[in-house]
Amino acid sequence: MSAANALLAAIHARLAADPQLMSMIATDGIRDRLLPRPVLPTLVIGEIETRDYSTATEAGEEHRLVLEVWSEAAGRREAEEIAERVRVLLQDAALTLSGHVLVSLAHERTRTRRQAKTACFASELRFRAVTEPLEPVSP
């Protein structure tokens, strides 16, 4: 499994295991895409960008990922409260990855906006993660 997929699986497991978060979102409310007619509020695992982050002696990857909270509430409060719970759960979390080691996971920023076409609110959380292979890579 790639480091990116292992990271996403660990993030999903961490979020799905939190009763407080699960009570804030719809049933099956963690998705990897926004469905055409989603039951809101929901949490969407958005884009992930992976780059080589190796040094002269250590292999590694840097991942920039986006998580989106979607809400149809009248204001932005619901989306922002869910986003804050996600931030608390993931900031510096010690996640176990299959075949890889999570060196760091840091929240970079959250942006909330109203979607004009749907009148929904979306909070976009951006995280940066660094991973290393579990086994050293031989030259």
Image (cartoon, rainbow, N blue to C red):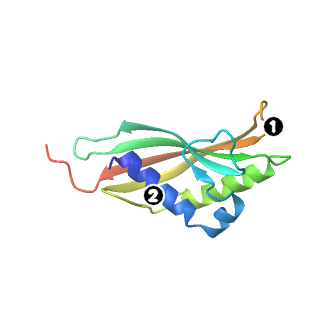
Position of 100 with respect to 113 (left or right) is left
Question: Which amino acid, by three-letter code, is at mark 1?
Answer: Ala
Helix, strand or loop for disc 2: helix
Q: Nearer the viewer, mark 2 or mark 1?
A: 1
Residue at image coords 39%, 52%: 6
Q: Look at mark 2 in the image and give the residue it sits on.
A: 10
Residue 117 lies, in percent from the top left, at: 77, 30
Element under disc 1: loop
Query: Of the numbered discs in the image, which one, if any, rests on residue 119?
Result: 1
Furthest residue toward right = 74
Nearer to me, 58 or 127: 127
Pinpoint residue 77: horizontal percent, then vertical percent.
80, 51
Is 56 above or below relative to 79?
above
> For the image shown, how many numbered marks are present on the structure?
2
Identity, as a three-letter code, of the amino acid under mark 2 = Ala
**Which residue is situated farthest in the top direction here?**
117
Residue 122 placement (x, y as % from top left): 71, 42
* Crowd class of label 2 (few under 14; some 14 to 19; many from 20; radius 10 Å): some
User: Residue placed at 40% from the left, 46% from the top?
Assistant: 4
Asked whether the beta carbons under mark 2 and mark 1 sit within 8 Å of each other, the answer is no
Q: Residue at x 69, y 55 (%)?
A: 82
Disc nearer the start of the sequence (2/1): 2
User: From the viewer's perspective, is residue 39 above or below residue 114?
Assistant: below
